[in-house]
Image: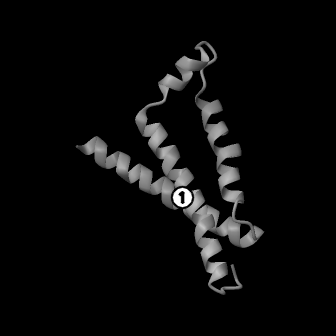
Amino acid sequence: MQGFVMVIILMLLFFVMMFGIGFILNMLMKTTWFPVGFYLIIVVPATVVMLWSSDKSWAENLMNYGLVDYLTGFAGLIGAMLSGKTIGLLRKSGYKMF
C-alpha cells in the first residue's frame, strides 16, 4: 500500500512539474506545442541515455524500466500536453497576456 501511495505522489509531482514548466514556456515563447516537443525530444531521451546499460541488448534495457517509470513518464507527458491546451483555452477566452 505504501508503494502505491508513493507512485501516485511521484506521478502527481511529474504532472505538476511539467505543467508548470510547460505553462511558463508557453507564455514566454508564444507556442502551445513546445513543451511537448521539449519533453519528447530532450527529457525522455536524456533519461533513457542516463539509465542505459551498454552490456545489455535493446530489449533488455527497455525491460529494465518498470511500470513506475512508464507511469511517471506518461504523467509528465500529460502535464506538458495539458499546459498547451490550457494556454490555448486562455488565449481563445481573450487573455492577451498568454
Q: Quadrant of residue 67?
A: top left
Residue at the location (50% across, 61% down)? 16
The residue carrying pointer 1 sits among few (fewer than 14), some (14 to 19) or many (20 or more) residues within 10 Å by Cα, namely: many
Q: Is residue 1 left or right of residue 67?
A: left
Quadrant assignment for the C terminus: bottom right
Please identify the residue farthest to the left as the structure is shown.
1
Residue at the location (74% across, 71% down)? 28
Q: Amino acid at mark 1?
A: Gly
Q: Please say if 73 is above or below 59.
A: below
Q: Position of residue 92 (x, y in %)?
A: 65, 80
Quadrant assignment for the N terminus: top left
Q: Is residue 74 left or right of residue 91?
A: left
Say which element carries label 1.
Answer: helix
Q: Nearer the viewer, residue 29 or 51?
A: 29
Q: Position of residue 69 (x, y in %)?
A: 47, 38
Q: Is residue 61 left or right of residue 9?
A: right
Q: Position of residue 31 (x, y in %)?
A: 74, 66
Q: Nearer the viewer, residue 57 or 88?
A: 88
Q: Nearer the viewer, residue 15 or 32?
A: 32
Residue at the location (65% across, 31% down)? 49
Q: Is residue 63 left or right of residue 34?
A: left
Residue at the location (56% across, 19% down)? 59
Please identify the residue farthest to the right as the structure is shown.
29
Q: Look at mark 1 in the image and give the residue it sits on.
A: 79
